[in-house]
Amino acid sequence: MKEIVKTKDAPGAIGPYSQAVKVKCGELLYISGQIPLDPETMEIVGKTASEQCQRVMQNLSGVLAAAGADFSNVIKTTIYLTDMNDFGPVNDMYSTYFTSNPPARACVEVSRLPKDVKVEIEAIAVL
């Protein structure tokens, strides 16, 4: 029914969740929220929200590739920010990964994210 997607090209889970879950019926891929961890060192990458967003997008790319997909397969994302003032820089970085036919998206401000990062993004893709 479902297949857990795991790759070394994105950080391993730091809690009770999978990097992604591939659903056989309907062929949907649910990607857990990614934060700006380097998959090799498990250290936070970037000081600014834009720099952290770039690492997050690289992590999403790694999970997508492990499932046989890329950003063109993404149909929905949710962006979590600890400061909505970072929306512009994050949006600018995010937009470089979705140059045409971008997915549906929500962006919300939250009080805190894991490891006190500035940005986290989750995604749903169709395979």
Image: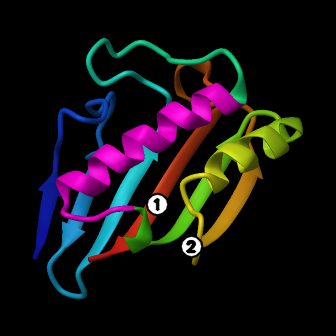
Give me the residue at 46% from left, 46% from top: 33
**Sequence order check: which comes first, mark 1 or mark 2?**
2
Whether residue 94 is visible here, answered yes or no, is yes
Residue found at the far right of this picture: 85
- Residue 74 against residue 10 in the figure, above or below: below
| Label 2: which secondary element | loop
Contact (CB < 8 A) between labels 1 and 2? yes
Residue at x-position 36% and y-position 49%: 61
Please name the amino acid that badge 2 sits on: Pro
The amino acid pointed to by label 1 is Ala
**Residue 91: % across, % down:** 73, 50
Main secondary structure along the magenta-highlighted residues: helix
> Relative to 23, is 48 on the left or the right?
right
Q: Position of residue 124 (x, y in %)?
A: 42, 67
Q: Residue at x 74, y 47 (%)?
A: 92
- Magenta residues? 50-70
Front-most of 20 and 67?
A: 67
The residue carrying mark 1 is 123
Q: Is residue 105 magenta?
A: no
Q: Position of residue 103 (x, y in %)?
A: 56, 73
Q: Secondary structure at mark 1?
A: strand
For discs 1 and 2, the disc positioned in front in the rendered view = 2
